[in-house]
Image (cartoon, helix red, strand yellow):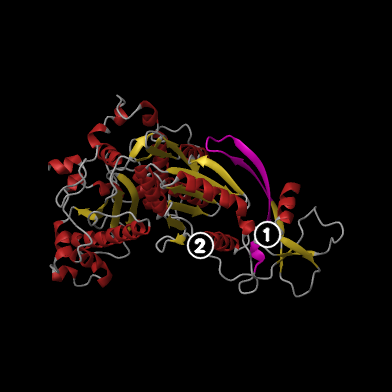
């Protein structure tokens, strides 16, 4: 606690002033935490003085509070780019990051309990810099750090404000910012080291070396590839749910699920919400969990015994695949492609459809989505067309991101769909009777195709990997598509790609085509043969 106070005083976080009747006082409190590293062992014991931000009044001592953070898709894209170019990836952390932010409002805080100033015990603190739990603290820190980067030649990406890029004659630097955690990579190692020294001169930085643990994700680098795992986090969810000793399952949902048959209310809704909320973060590197977690999230308001039973089945599946993680490789191209699909009227209650898509940079998966559509559709053509529009928007966003990074695309992105009627609609305004009611913004995909900025070939329904985002699948199909989504067990990195484990016999057969995309060629070998 004394070390925390000394750090705050050295940072000139506040000044002591006389208490006045007009002041809106904000309380203070101590927060104690045992920080753990990725394997669950103790890193350090930490004490932090924070404000009681709920005492703040809108318009009086705060206005704007929003602060952007890096998007998961951007992280995966930049990691893939660094692997392909064989760039070093460094991990940095800022000590007491929020304390670096300047605030313009007048904020007065009570002195912490038990540690008053001996000379002025009745005085209060007038804050000059942001403190943790202030509503505007994240925004103040982001403004301070982004201003520093912009002053030193970086520019902020328009499509992701937490992505900062420097293009110079000496090389390229890319910085990803998530509050006080950041990843830094670039084409010139000397330029990378010089910039880290510059950061040290301005902020209290911690150089954590090569990337190994970012946002709770364990990252192992080997043979020009990265393996992203959340095994420890998955264990913590199982422990929280009292299911560490549960029997594993091969699938997260029953393949014939048609809705909930038992609507008896679950006795502990808060526990249900806590477990499902934790599972949502697990989908950060586990695309195979996206649909089932999205499905059980629809019952957060009033969970039933049946929905809790589904959550337990998901946890049992997590137990059986706990060492699976996302595998990114540098032995690939940098061409964009995507897969789009939809399950027509899949929800038995609302009869709404589910949109699913995933995008790839070369053979590395970048983004994915499993989301219920906002309205009921009259035909499978309509739902597939809507799904294609959302997929095209995602590919367009990734194109803009690659443009900021100066990654040229040799050809337009390719979007695969298994519905011929929807594909015809992307080229010609056909099926007027079935499509005249569709909102104009969904015809965005037709415009992209007509401008030559998107190619939409057909893919067989049996090879449509996005089925995993739209419906429950049987064991064989789930494992086949899981392999296509860059998911591998962690031990495959140590034992090599080719080994006799039954879980990984698929790897040799799922090698991507050495050839990039031709007009009618798809990256999966099975599709090429067809």
Residue 344: percent from left, percent from top: 23, 57
Which numbered circle lies on residue 451?
none
Q: Give the range drawn in magenta.
A: 31-56
**The C terminus sits in image quarter:** top left
Q: Name the residue under label 1.
A: 51
Q: In this view, does 457 lie to the left or right of 112?
A: left
Q: In the rendered image of this protein, does residue 465 appear above or below residue 21?
A: above
Asked whether residue 51 is drawn in magenta, I would say yes
Q: Name the residue under label 2.
A: 150
Q: Is residue 12 visible?
A: yes
- SS category of the residue bearing label 1: strand
Label 2 neighbour load within 10 Å: few <14, some 14-19, many 20+: some
Asked whether residue 40 is drawn in magenta, I would say yes
Q: Which residue appears at 61% of the width and 36% of the height?
A: 42
Q: Which of marks 2 and 1 is in front?
A: 2
Label 1 neighbour load within 10 Å: few <14, some 14-19, many 20+: many
Q: In the picture, residue 410 is in which quadrant?
A: bottom left
Q: Can residue 215 be seen in this view?
A: no
């Amino acid at each position: 606690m004394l070390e925390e106070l000394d750090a705050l005083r050295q940072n000139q976080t506040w000044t002591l002033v006389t208490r006045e009747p007009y002041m809106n006082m904000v309380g203070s409190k101590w927060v104690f935490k045992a920080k753990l590293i990725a394997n669950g062992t103790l890193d350090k014991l930490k004490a932090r003085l924070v404000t009681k931000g709920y005492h703040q009044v809108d318009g009086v001592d705060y206005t704007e509070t929003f602060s952007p953070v890096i998007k998961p898709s951007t992280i995966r894209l930049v990691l893939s780019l660094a692997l392909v170019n064989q760039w070093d990836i460094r991990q940095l952390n800022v000590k007491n990051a929020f304390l670096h932010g300047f605030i313009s409002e007048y904020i007065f805080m009570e002195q912490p309990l038990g540690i008053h100033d001996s000379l002025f015990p009745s005085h209060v603190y007038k804050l000059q810099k942001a403190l943790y739990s202030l509503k505007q603290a994240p925004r103040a820190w982001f403004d301070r750090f982004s201003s520093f980067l912009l002053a030193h030649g970086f520019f902020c990406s328009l499509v992701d404000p937490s992505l900062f890029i420097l293009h110079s004659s000496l090389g390229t630097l890319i910085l990803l910012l998530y509050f006080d955690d950041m990843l830094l990579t670039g084409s010139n190692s000397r330029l990378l080291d010089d910039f880290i020294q510059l950061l040290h001169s301005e902020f209290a930085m911690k150089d954590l070396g090569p990337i190994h643990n970012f946002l709770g994700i364990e990252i192992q680098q080997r043979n020009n590839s990265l393996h992203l795992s959340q095994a420890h986090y998955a264990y913590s969810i199982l422990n929280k749910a009292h299911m560490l000793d549960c029997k594993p399952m091969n699938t997260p949902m029953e393949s014939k699920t048609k809705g909930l048959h038992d609507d008896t209310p679950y006795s502990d809704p808060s526990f249900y919400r806590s477990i499902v909320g934790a599972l949502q973060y697990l989908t950060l590197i586990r695309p195979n969990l996206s649909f089932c977690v999205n499905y059980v999230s629809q019952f957060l308001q009033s969970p039933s015994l049946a929905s809790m039973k589904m959550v337990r089945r998901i946890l049992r599946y997590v137990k059986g695949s706990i060492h699976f993680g996302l595998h990114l490789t540098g032995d690939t191209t940098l061409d964009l492609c995507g897969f789009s699909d939809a399950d027509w009227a899949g929800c038995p209650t609302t009869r709404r459809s589910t949109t699913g898509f995933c995008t790839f940079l070369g053979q590395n998966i970048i983004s994915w989505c499993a989301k219920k559509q906002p309205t009921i559709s009259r035909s499978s053509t309509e739902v597939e067309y809507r799904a294609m529009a959302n997929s095209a928007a995602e590919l367009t966003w990734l194109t803009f991101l690659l443009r900021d990074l100066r990654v040229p695309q040799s050809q337009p992105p390719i979007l695969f769909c298994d519905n011929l009627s929807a594909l015809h609609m992307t080229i010609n305004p056909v099926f007027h009777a079935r499509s005249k009611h569709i909102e104009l913004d969904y015809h965005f995909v037709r415009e992209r195709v007509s401008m030559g900025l998107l190619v939409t070939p057909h893919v067989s329904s049996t090879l449509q990997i996005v089925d995993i985002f739209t419906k429950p699948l049987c064991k064989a199909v789930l494992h086949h598509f899981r392999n296509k989504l860059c998911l591998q067990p962690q031990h495959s990195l140590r034992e090599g790609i080719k080994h006799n484990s039954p879980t990984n016999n698929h790897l040799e057969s799922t090698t991507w085509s050495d050839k990039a995309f031709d007009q009618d060629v798809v990256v999966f070998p099975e599709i090429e043969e067809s």
